[in-house]
Image (cartoon, grey):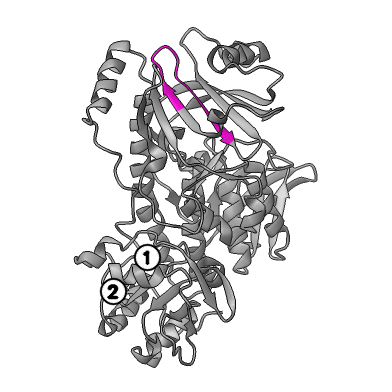
Amino acid sequence: MAPADFDVAVVGYGPTGLTAASLLGQLGHRVVVIERWATLYGLPRLTHIDGETARLLSFACDIDDALRDSSPIDSYVFYNAKGKPLIDVGKLPSPPMGFPAHISIHQPDIEEAIDRRVRTLPTVSVRQGTELTGLRQSGGSVELAVNSAAGADTLRARYVLGADGARSFVRSALSIERDDNGFNERWLNIDGERKRPLASSFEETKQYCDPARGHMFLPIGKNRQRFEFALLKHEETAEMEKPEAAWKLLRQYHGVGPDDIKIIRQVVYTFECRMAQSWRKGQTFLGGDAAHTMPPYMGQGACSGIRDAANIAWKLDLVLRGTATPDLLDSYELERRPHVANIMSSAVMLGKVANTHSRLIAFFRDLAFRFNLVPPPPPFPRLNAGVIQNERRDEAGKVVGSVPPQGQVRVGGMTSRLDAQVGYRFALIAQSNPVATLDSSRVGFLRDLGCRLFTLADDAGPGVERIVDVEGVYGAYLAEKHVVAMLTRPDTYVFGLAATDAELPRLVDDLRGKLAWRQNVVAA
C-alpha cells in the first residue's frame, strides 16, 4: 500500500479536534484536519471549563488569550421551586490548579486561540469546508475519501481520531453503536449579550429545580448571559425557537426584556447520555461527543473531550516516533471510558434532581436535602488503570492517577505556573537530585522520553533543573503524601511516586514497562 500522507487525520475541529491537532502538531507530526464547516462555529455552546481543563488547554494555545473574556465561577447552586438552596456543586473540593476551579468562558475565544496556534504549525494542514465521505482501513493505515469545493480527494493517514460530534460519520463508518443511558430532556437555550448591567444575581450560576418547569441561568464570560428552560411535553420545538417564546419566558421567570439583552442564539437541545460501545477499531479512535455525550449538569461534556485529546496525543506521539509499541494505544479507552462513565453518572444524578416533574417527588427530594439525607456527589474520578503505577497499595497509591496541584515556580530565572515550564511532557519532581539515585540507563530512558528532571534541592547537579517552589505547593504536596518524588504525565496525571530515594529506580522501571517501551531506541 502507498505510504501514508499524514501521521494522524483529525476529523472534526471543535474543542476535541482543535486540541488534538495543536498538541500533535507541536510534537512535529504530520496532521490533517478534516472539517465539513468552512469556518469556526463562532457562537458559544460550551460555557464552562474547570481548572484541570484550563491546564490542558494551556498546552494547546496561549491560555491568557483563550481566557481573555472569562470569569471565575464561585458557585453553582441548585434551588428548589421556592428558591431554597439544595446543593452547591461549585463548592465541591478541588486542589489548586493555577486557575479558578470553575471558569465561565466564551467558547469562540478558546477555539480561536487554539486555531491561531495550529495555524503556526508547519506540519498541520487544516481543511475546512471538507467533508469526509468514506473511510477504509487496510494494513497499517487508513484511507479517507473527502469532498470539498475543490473536488474529491483521497488521503491516507496512519491513525485517525474521529472527533466529529454526536452524529459522528467516523463512528457510523466503523459500525460502532452507542449505549443509551436513558436520559433525554428537551431544553430551550437562549444566549444573549447584555445591553446594560443586570442584577448581581445574574453573575452567579443558578439551577431552579421546579417541577412546573426547570430553568437556569449563568454568565458566559464577562458580558454575555445564558438562560435555559425545560420544555413541556406539549411544546413544539419549532414554536419554542421563535423569538416571542424566548421573550415570554425571560419576562415571566427573570424580568428580562429586549432593553436588557440582545438574543444572539436560540435553540432547543435534547440532552442525552450515550456512550460508544467501543472507542477504537483498528487504527481509528473516537473522542469527544463522537465517543460520549452527557447531560450538562456537571459542565463536563467538552472538558471530557479535551481530556480525550490530551490523553491520546502523547501516546500517538510515542508510537509514531517508534519509541513505544502500538500496545500503548490500548490504554486510551482503558483510561478514558471509566473516567467518563463516572462523570456521566454524576451528571445524570444531578439531572434527575433538576428534572423532577412530580411535585410529590420534588417535595420528598427537598426534605432529603434539607435534612442532609442525600449523600454528596462522589469525589472527582481519577485513573484506576492504564499508564499509572496502580500496583501501589499504600497511602501514596491513593493519589496515583489523580491530577496534582499546580503552583508558581521559578526555574532558571523565569517565574510562572509549573505547566508553562514543563510543557506537554513527562516531569519528575524530586526533593533531592534524582540523577544521584538513578543509573545511566534509567536517566537515558527519561531523557529519550523527553522527561524534564527537577529538584527542590539547592544543588541540582548536571542535567537536573532546580525548582524554586515560590508558593510552597510542591514541597507541601510531597510532604503531605509522605513521598520524596512524583512522576507526572504530559496530560498532568500522576503516574507514580517514590516514598524514598531507593524507590526511584523502581518508579522509572514501572514507567518504562507501562509505556510498552521499545528497547535500544533513541527518541527523535
Magenta stretch, overall SS: strand
Residue shown at the point (35%, 32%) measured from the top left: 87
Residue placed most toward the observer, 18 or 67: 67
Verify CB contact (< 8 Å) between mark 2 and mark 1.
no
| Position above or below: 237 against 94 | above
Disc 1 residue type? Answer: Val
Q: Residue, x 22% and y 67% (percent of image)?
A: 392
- Please provide percent x and percent y for residue 382: 33, 54
Give the SS element for disc 2.
Answer: loop
Where disc 1 sits, the SS reads strand
Quarter residue 295 falls in: top left
Q: Earlier in the sequence, mark 2 or mark 1?
A: 2
Q: Position of residue 326 (x, y in %)?
A: 43, 66
Q: Is residue 504 above or below residue 220?
A: below
Quadrant where the C terminus sits is bottom right
Residue 270: percent from left, percent from top = 50, 24
Q: Place residue 439 in its image quadrant.
A: bottom left
Please give the label number shown on residue 494: 1
Cα separation between marks 2 and 1: 13 Å
Residue 305 within the magenta-colored segment of the rendering: no
Q: Which residue is mark 2?
A: 483
The range drawn in magenta is 207-219
**From this viewpoint, is residue 208 visible?**
yes
